[in-house]
Image (cartoon, rainbow, N blue to C red):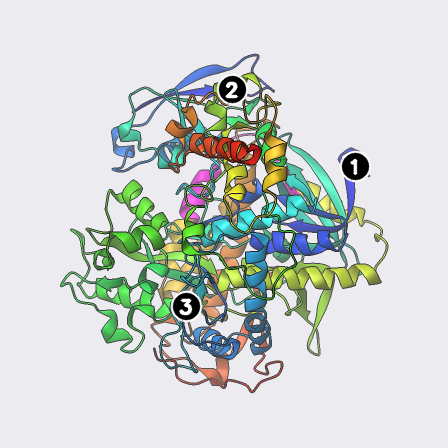
Amino acid sequence: MKFLIYRYDPESDKKPFMQAFELADDEIQPGMMLRDALLKIKSQDETLAFRHSCGEGVCGSDAININGANGLGCLTAVSSLKQPIEVRPVPGMPVIRDLVVDMSQFFKHYRGVKPWLIVHDSEPEVEYLQSPEDRDKLDGLYECILCGCCSTSCPSFWWNPDKFRGPAALLQSYRFLADSRDQATEERLEDLDGPYRMFRCHTIMNCVNVCPKSLNPTAAINNIKKLMVKDMV
Amino acid sequence: MSSALRDLPRRQFDSLVIGAGGGGLRAALQLAQADAKVAVVSKVFPTRSHTVAAQGGINAALANVLPDNWHWHMYDTIKGSDYLGDQDAIEYMCRAASKLVIELEHAGVPFSRLDNGKIYQRPFGGQSQNFGGEQAARTCAAADRTGHVILHTLYQQNIRAKTHFFDEYFAIDLIRDDNGFILGALVLEIETGEPLLIEAKTTLLATGGAGQLFRTNTNAHINTGDGLAMALRAGIPLQDMEFFQFHPTGIAGRGMLITEGARGEGGYLINKDGERFMERYAPHAKDLASRDVVSRAIFTEVKEGRGCGPNADHVMLKLDHLGKEVLEKRLPGICETSRTFLHIEPSEEPIPVYPTAHYTMGGIPTNRHGQVVVPVEQGEECIPGLYAAGECACVSVHGANRLGGNSLLDIVVFGRAAGNDIIKFLKENRYHRKIDEASVQAALDHLHRWDQKGEGESVAEIRADLKAVMEEYCGVFRTEEILQQGVEKVLEIEQRMKNVRLQDHSKIFNTARIEALEVENLLDIAVATVTSALARQESRGAHSRIDYPDRNDQQWLKHSLFFKEGRRLDYKPVTLQPLSVDTFPPKARVY
C-alpha cells in the first residue's frame, strides 16, 4: 500500500516536501485504520511526527487531511482510500512539524464562546431538573471532541482565523444556548453579533461533510441565527 | 553547576498538577477556586486525556431509579475489592458520591434524564441493594459518553477559573530535597524540546494508569503510567501492582472498550452454543457479577472449547433483543464503535468480545486526603508536598478489583480531597523551599540520556516485546512458573533498554523521544507488576493464581509495596476500620 506523507521539520528542512512510504501487503490487516498504518510507518521511520491517542475517535487528537479531506486517522479505514494515500496536516493552521499543527487559534475561539454552563439563580441541593425532551436538544452538540476537522476545512475560517469563531466554537456556543439549564442566552447572543464572529459563516457546509462524529455545525449556526431573530422581536 | 542547569528556565507556582484528566482537573478547579496559583502540566491537550474514553457512568447512591444509600454502595465496593480495599477511604468516597455528582451536574454535565427530570441511572456490575440483595441501579450516565462529558465540563470550568495550563508538556521527574520534600518537577515542552523547571510548594500526580503495559488493551496510547514511574524513581514504592483489571468486554483482538453499561441495559454474554454461560458462574448476578469474575468466566469458556468464531477465541455480547431504539438512546457510542471497527449493527448481530487489559488498581500509596504515604518503622508518614489522585494513586478504594462506575467517582472524590488538603498545606507552608540543584541535575541527566547517538535497538521493538511479555506472562491466570519467567523476561528487556538509541534528535515536536521516555516508564512499572504478582501466593480479585486458587486472609490480607531499589517488596495492613460505621469483615465472595 502506497502513501505520500507531508514532511517538514523546521530544524532541518528549508521547506515542506511529500515523502513516499510503502507498506507490504502482509502488513495490511483487514479493517486497518489509517492511524494503524501511520504507526507502522513510524516504526520504520521514527522521525514521522503526528498526534494520536485513544484510537477510537473520542480524544480528537488525530485530525489530518486525508486525500484532500479532513478526518480522523483512527476512524478512516485504509481500504476505503485511493492510493497513494496522501496525508497532510489539516489546512489553514501553522505547521509545527510534519502532521502536527498549532491549534492555539482554534482553542482561543473555543474559550471565546464561554463554553461553560452559566446559571444566575442560587444552586439547589439536588440536581437541576431537565426533561428528557430538553436533554434531547443537546444530542448532536455535546458529542464534539474538539478535533478541529470542521474549522480547519472552513474557507471562512481560513480567511478570517482571528475574527471568525469557526464551526467548532459556534457549535459549542449553541450547545449552551440549547441547554435548558443555561441562563446566559442574551449575553451569548450579543457576544456573537457583528459581521465576523458568526456571520462570516456562508453555509459552505464543509464542516458538516468532514465531522467524524456526524455533527452538524451549520445547523447549530442557523439555530443561533433564529434565536437572534427571536431575541429582536 | 552545569550550563544546562544554569540556563534552565524556571517558573514558580503554589501548586503543580501533573495530568489533566478528571482527577487533575478536579483538583486544579478546587485550587483555582481557592485562589491558589495552580499550573496544570499535561502531555496532551486536556480534553485528549483518557478520562474522555470512560463510557458507562459514575456511581452515586442517588436512588433516582431504585432504593439506594451510600452504605450499600460501600458494602458493594468492599466486596468488589475482595476485601483488599481500605474501608475508611471507601466510606469517605461513597459518602461523598452524591454530593459530587450533583456538583458535576451543576457544573454543566449533560447527564441523561429520567421522565421526572432527574439524572438517569443504570445498573452496573457488583451493585446490590441492602448489602448483597437485589440488583441496584447506581450508575449515573450521559448515554455511554460519561467520561467525555465529565472531562469536557471540568476543563470548561477550569478555563472559567483561569487555571494556568501547560499543554503538551511532558513531566520527566520529580524534584526532591534532602529533607524529603517534593519541590516540583522538571518538564519538557514538546513543541520546542526545551526543558523547564516548575517549582511548586505542592505537586499532585494525576497521570492515570498504565494499560499500555499489555498488547491488547482498552487504553489510549498515552496511558503509560508516567507518574507511577516518576514516583518509583523518587524512591516511593508502588502499592498492589499485581492487581490489574481485565475488562470482560473489549472488542476481541482489537481492544476497544464495550461498556459494562451494555450488560447494565440488559445485554448478556453467550458462548458458541448460544448458552448464557454467566448463569453457571454467578447464578445470582449473572452478567453483572464483578469484572474479575466475568473475565475469568469468559477465559474459561474459551479455554474449554466453547469460544466463538473460526478460532473459537472469544465469546459474544448479545444486545439485539434490546431493540434499536434503546441501543441508539442509551448506547450510541458503542453502536458507532461496532459499526466503524466491526461493521456490525448491534441491533442485529452480537459483538465479539474478550477480556482486555483495562485498569491499574495499584499505584502510588496515598491516604484519603491524597497525601502520598510511605512506611516508616512505626506505621507510615506523608511525603511532604506530594499528592496523588485517580488511577495512578492507590488509596485504596478498589483493592483487588474495581467496580465499574467507581473510577470516575474515584477521580472526582480524591481529586477534590487532594485539592482541599493542598490548600491546607499551602496555608502552613507559605514560601517555596530552596531548590535542590543536584536533584534537578539528575532529572536533566535522565532526559539527556536520549541525546546519545549511534546504532542501537529501536524504542518500537522494546515496546512491542515488553507488551507481548506482559500479556503472556502476567495475564488473567497466573502461576509461579509463568510469573518467574515473566520476571526474567522483563529484566532482560530492561538490560536491552540500555542499548536503545534514538534516530530522531530534532528538538521540534519529537514524538520519538517522548515515546522513549514513556517506554522507560512502562518498563519500571512492568518490573513492579510482575514482581508483586510473583510474590502474592493467593488468588484475590483480579490476581488469579492457578497454583493458589483460594484467597488467603491469614497471610495475604495486606497491601504489597514494591520499591525500585533492589526490587524490594514490603507489606502493610489493610485498613479494616471505617470512619463511622462497623467493619465489613472479609467473607466468601459469591455473586
Query: The disc numbered 1 marks a residue on which chain?
Result: B
Q: CA distance from mark 1 to mark 2?
A: 50 Å
> Mark 1 and 3 residues: CB-CB less than 8 Å, in contact?
no
- The residue sitting at 49% across, 21% down in the picture is A91
Q: Main secondary structure of the magenta part?
A: helix
Q: Which residue is mark 2?
A: A156
Q: Which residue is mark 1?
A: B2
For badge 2, the amino acid type reads Ser
- The span picked out in magenta is B446-466
Q: Residue B465: horizontal and vertical position, in percent?
A: 41, 47
Give the camera-side residue of B583 and A20: B583
Q: Is residue B116 left or right of residue A181?
A: left
Query: The disc numbered 2 marks a residue on which chain?
Result: A
In magenta segment, residue B447: yes
The image shows residue B189, relative to residue A66, as above or below, that is below
Q: CA distance from mark 1 to mark 3?
A: 48 Å
Q: Which residue is mark 3?
A: B542
